[in-house]
């Protein structure tokens, strides 16, 4: 018998990854196609970046924004000019901005609470400023949004295959034909034959060392190891922005790394940021914002990570968020917001367990691990229908490249759009094609199973983290990146992974994908011979070069060779 | 040692095993789950949130402890109270009194 044992599935539309984008894609595809499968490495009820919550979604709220004199075009222009600095898929950001509210209303239809009695705004929404120059970001009860979405996926009749990690794609005559994955619990190879495939596996985390040294102490889910991007690259999908990395990703509570906007900001208007000398380095909101009824401005001027880093470098660290003051109502609002965002509920529970209290204790902040973040927008280049350069293969949310800070609206709207495109594509495909492409994964797993002793996945993980952190962060240059590539290639050829069970085998397959992603990152870094924003700083090319590099740098594999192309948005 | 299960409260339903994104738990169906991969915990708290019996809480490995630091910054200065109230109301989308 061939190892591993194979389970076959077939469908019209396959959705890979059950985060926000994948769930929304599955629901919409389920409305338009007969047979839809959603495959997830974990369980969509609590998987992806919104696993235990997302408390904010930006969008265009016509009644609110029009009263403040801001049109849809104004908001799109703000995003293009100020957030993406011109380097963005313009059609897609327009679509995202225009339809975000529709998807928010879908969430309400599925059962999410998004309106509040005490709000005096039209629609009774709680709207905050966040990244745009207006208040357009809904605060809502999002802790259980993944459970709500998963229920909607089930109601739509979509088959959920959980605990399967899709890791390679099947092609037939250059067209998508499905995917193959490893069963993280059953240890079987799962072959998905499909007419169209939507990729929604998110970012590659776990490429770099973490500040605490603990491999899984990440802001975003450590479950995400770039499996989708690695799979796409192997079949010739063109990836852009892979050279961009946020160093550090952003700031979080020290030691217990979590997502969410500490200090102050929308959470706690009376909160302040302090340095090690107890000087205020981040004033209370009202000291920097004029709260007129038509207030305009972004939150970035009150929460600049660079400002916090400058304090550390000036010898005035550490940095704290002091949120001790405020009425009971303010404290309650802050706790409500934190509990619905990221791992906030766990954070509050842990605080209580260890006797910590915002009234009595300030919280130390520290830079987190480098991230291929929402600002980087790394992934396949997609057209206005979310399609990649492979016919029938689509990407949505963080999986797709070229739309910086599309975040939750990007996931929800592109999930929806990719499903409409994929369903239409599937309708035109007569019968499900017999694709090929599962052999690499099968052989990778079979070799590991046959081995009696060798290297643990933990050793491979640490080696990858060391290579990426040593050669692709502060000391980045062409020669260092080339050495990084040599090292990754050495690891790939030399490691003799062993796995005692499917759980360990899953980690081994992750190592294969992390190495693939690391190689793409280093190659693109070498190719972009400039420094750009705070996402790419090279020692050998410290200046920005708009003449040659105001573009998306595309990297793809063609007949076993690496090809680069420039795309001008 | 992150997720700690109170075996007296556990209803042996397997919810934690079902939802854990990191697949830290092991569950056979006849006794409370064990946590063989606690070192791989993301500390997302899904298990604690979804446990119908409230039988799970998270404990932190030492490198993840939040080291206490006394909050020192005092109440707002004179004349600031009204401005703060206005800012707080704005935050909650309450514009008119």
Image (cartoon, coloured by chain):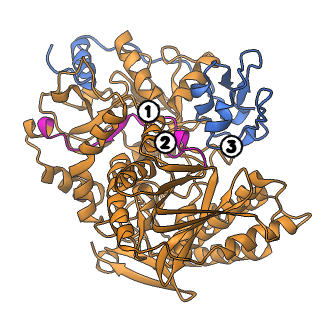
Chain colours: A orange, B blue
- The reply to whether residue A540 is visible in this rendering is no
Position of A191 with respect to A444 (left or right) is: left
Mark yes or no: residue A110 visible.
yes
Q: Secondary structure at mark 1?
A: loop
Q: Main secondary structure of the magenta part?
A: loop
| Left or right for A92, reference A190 | left
**Residue, disc 2:** A251
Magenta segment boundaries in residue numbering = A42-64
Inter-mark Cα distance, 2 to 1:
8 Å
> Magenta includes A487?
no
| Residue A95 percent location from the top left of the image | 24, 57
The foreground one among A301 and A67 is A67
Q: Which-is-in-front pick, marks 3 and 1?
A: 3
> Does the residue at mark 2 contact the one at mark 1 (Cβ under 8 Å)?
yes
Chain at numbered mark 1? A
Please tell me if label 3 and label 2 are on a single chain: no
Residue holding disc 1: A262
In the image, residue A428 above or below residue A165: below
Label 2 resides on the chain identified as: A
Q: Is residue A521 left or right of residue B10?
A: left
Q: Earlier in the sequence, mark 2 or mark 1?
A: 2
Label 2: how many Cα within 10 Å (few below 14, some 14–19, many 20+): many
Q: Are marks 3 and 1 on the same chain?
A: no
- Secondary structure, mark 2, is strand
A166 or B68: nearer the viewer: A166
Marked residue chain, label 3: B
């Amino acid at each position: 018998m061939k190892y591993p044992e194979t389970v076959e599935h077939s469908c019209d539309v396959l959705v890979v990854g059950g985060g926000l984008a994948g769930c929304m894609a599955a629901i919409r595809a389920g409305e338009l196609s007969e047979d839809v499968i959603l495959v997830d490495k974990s369980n969509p009820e609590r998987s992806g970046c919104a696993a235990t919550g997302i408390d904010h979604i930006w969008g265009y709220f016509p009644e609110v924004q029009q009263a403040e004199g801001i049109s849809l075009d104004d908001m799109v222009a703000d995003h293009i000019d100020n957030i993406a600095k011109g380097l963005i898929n313009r059609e897609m950001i327009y679509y995202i901005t225009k339809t975000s509210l529709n998807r928010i209303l879908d969430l309400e239809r599925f059962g999410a609470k998004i309106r509040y009695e005490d709000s005096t705004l039209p629609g009774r929404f709680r709207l905050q400023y966040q990244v745009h120059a207006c208040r357009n970001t809904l605060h809502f009860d999002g802790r259980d949004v993944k459970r709500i979405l998963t229920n909607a996926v089930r109601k739509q009749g979509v088959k959920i295959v959980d605990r399967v990690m899709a890791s390679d794609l099947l092609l037939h005559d250059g067209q998508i034909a499905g995917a193959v994955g490893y069963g993280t619990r059953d240890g079987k190879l799962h072959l998905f034959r499909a007419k169209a495939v939507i990729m929604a596996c998110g970012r590659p985390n776990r490429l770099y060392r973490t500040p605490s040294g603990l491999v899984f102490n990440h802001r975003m889910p450590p479950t995400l190891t770039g499996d989708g991007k690695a799979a796409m690259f192997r079949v010739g999908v063109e990836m852009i922005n892979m050279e961009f990395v946020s160093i550090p990703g952003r700031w979080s509570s020290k030691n217990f790394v979590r997502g969410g906007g500490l200090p102050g900001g929308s959470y706690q208007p009376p909160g302040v940021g302090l340095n090690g000398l107890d000087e205020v380095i981040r004033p209370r909101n009202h000291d920097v914002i004029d709260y007129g009824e038509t207030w305009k401005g972004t939150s970035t001027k009150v929460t600049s990570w660079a400002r916090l880093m400058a304090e550390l470098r000036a010898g005035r660290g550490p940095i704290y968020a002091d949120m001790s003051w405020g009425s009971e109502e303010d404290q309650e609002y802050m706790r409500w917001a934190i509990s619905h965002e990221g791992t906030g509920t766990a954070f509050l529970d842990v605080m209580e367990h260890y006797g910590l209290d915002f009234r009595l204790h300030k919280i130390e902040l520290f830079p987190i691990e480098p991230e291929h973040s929402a600002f980087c927008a790394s992934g396949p280049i997609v057209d206005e229908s979310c399609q990649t350069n492979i016919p029938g293969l689509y990407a949505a949310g963080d999986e797709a490249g070229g739309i910086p800070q599309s975040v939750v609206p990007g996931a929800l709207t592109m999930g929806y759009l990719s499903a409409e495109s994929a369903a239409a594509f599937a309708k035109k495909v007569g019968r499900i094609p017999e694709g090929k492409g599962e052999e690499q994964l099968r052989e990778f797993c079979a070799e590991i199973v046959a081995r009696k002793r060798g290297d643990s996945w933990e050793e491979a993980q640490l080696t990858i983290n060391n290579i990426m952190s040593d050669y692709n962060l502060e000391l980045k240059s062409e020669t260092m990146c080339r050495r990084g590539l040599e090292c990754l290639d050495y690891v790939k050829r030399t490691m003799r992974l062993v796995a005692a069970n499917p759980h360990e085998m899953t980690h081994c397959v992750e190592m294969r994908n992390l190495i693939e992603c690391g190689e793409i990152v280093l190659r693109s870094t070498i190719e972009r011979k400039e420094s750009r924003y705070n996402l790419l700083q090279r020692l050998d090319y410290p200046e920005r070069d708009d003449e040659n590099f105001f573009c998306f740098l595309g990297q793809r594999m063609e007949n076993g060779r690496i090809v680069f192309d420039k795309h001008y948005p | 040692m992150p997720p700690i299960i109170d075996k007296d409260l556990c209803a042996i339903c397997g919810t934690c095993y079902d939802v854990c994104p990191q697949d830290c738990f092991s569950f056979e169906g006849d006794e409370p789950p064990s946590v063989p991969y606690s070192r791989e915990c993301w500390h997302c708290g899904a298990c604690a949130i979804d446990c119908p019996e409230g039988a799970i809480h998270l404990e932190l490995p030492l490198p993840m402890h939040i080291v206490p630091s006394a909050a020192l910054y005092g109440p707002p200065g004179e004349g600031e109270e009204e401005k703060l109230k206005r800012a707080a109301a704005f935050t909650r989308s309450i514009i008119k009194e």
